[in-house]
Image (cartoon, rainbow, N blue to C red):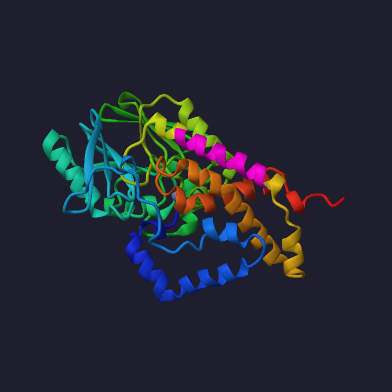
Amino acid sequence: MTAESAKPPASRRTFLAGTGAAAAGTAAAALLAGPLAGTARAAGPVCPPGQFAPVPQSALGPPVNADGYFVGQIKGDLYWVTDSFYTAMFLTTRDGVVLVDAPPTIGHNLLRAIGAVTQANGRPSQVTHLVYSHSHADHIGASVLFGPDVVRIGHSECRTLLLRDNDPNRPPPEVTFDEHFTLTVGGETLLLDFHGPNHTPDNIFIRAPAQQTLMLVDVIFPGWVPFKELAVSQDIPDWIKAQDVALSLPWQTLVAGHLGRLGTRDDAELQIAYVADLIASARATMASLNPAPIFQEFGNNAWAIFKVYLDAASAQAAAPVTAKYLGKLAAADVFTFDNAFEVFEFVLRVDGGVLGPFGIHP
Ligand SMILES: [Zn+2]
């Protein structure tokens, strides 16, 4: 996910107004003039900011403190920390702290949270190990705060990507693995597993078996619909499968990397149902949406035909799913259009081979 998602809505709105991106939205609306414009505009990306449905209380986590963070015990020596946009977790052991991810928006509050917890439980506060869920800067961009001596651990592809990115805030992991790694520090254990690419080619499953906890980032979003375009994931069919892999593992608590609360197995099941409903709705849309008027209207402008067709299809596929999940999953009205686009484009079209009007010519 991009760092952009971390910005509070108000400043993002200001930013959009300042750069004229709001005007671009108006231009997109004009493009949609035609027989399908009504549907596309109603559920599409041109919805004015500030007119979204309220966030259900069930989606929200505990309030953050004056420093802007909340830290809580999951079970035993396992803790989680959030700024309500991002989450990380850490194990306090008799030999030091094992931290999983270092989101820059939490930043120095990671050190404050770890300091407060270890002061209370009498364990050493030094972070000795830092596990990377995946290479993205919005989840590990504060890695630099833990100095050159912390043992950084991640998937081998994570190292490859970070060597490419060459970002001083994200030193590549020195300890890497391909399939499985058991990390034991001071009597505490984390199980690190790679189950194939999903959100990224290096995104791993991190389990604390004694605490019945799974950390899996950018796949399941407890209480909320997935971030735009199914968490801007690089492999959509395998991202969808990763939801099921998560449920196949034994855990009771999920640390999902985003938003402000922990997750449950019910949260995972609800998201799986949402995605399944989106796929079913996209299939029905592919079968029922008549593209002929769009081809007629936009003539030789191939990109306009693709855009208007895909926008109309996304709007039609999203509409019943948004209606069904409003009040059950926060921001169903914010990102279901973009998530429907992703399903239409990848699950159906390019990875599924269900091409509709762009299939094999008769
Ligand atoms: Zn990511």
Residue 318, given in percent of the width and then of the height, sits at 55, 48
Residue 235, given in percent of the width and then of the height, sits at 58, 45
In this rendering, position of residue 298 left or right of residue 239: right
204 in the magenta segment: no
271 in the magenta segment: yes
Residue in the image at 36% along x and 55% along y: 141
Residue in the image at 59% along x and 46% along y: 343
Q: Which residues are magenta?
A: 270-285
Residue 36, given in percent of the width and then of the height, sits at 64, 59
Secondary structure, magenta segment, majority class: helix
Q: Is residue 295 above or below residue 1?
A: below
Q: Is residue 203 above or below residue 103?
A: above
Q: Nearer the viewer, residue 178 or 192?
A: 192
The quadrant holding residue 190 is: top left
Residue in the image at 49% along x and 41% along y: 324
Q: Residue furthest right?
A: 362
Residue 137, given in percent of the width and then of the height, sits at 40, 55
Q: Nearer the viewer, residue 4 or 149?
A: 4
The quadrant holding residue 170 is: bottom left
Using the rendered image of the protein, determine whether residue 199 is visible from the camera's viewpoint: no
Using the rendered image of the protein, determine whether residue 260 is visible from the camera's viewpoint: yes
Residue in the image at 62% along x and 69% along y: 31
> How many numbered callouts?
0
The quadrant holding residue 150 is: top left
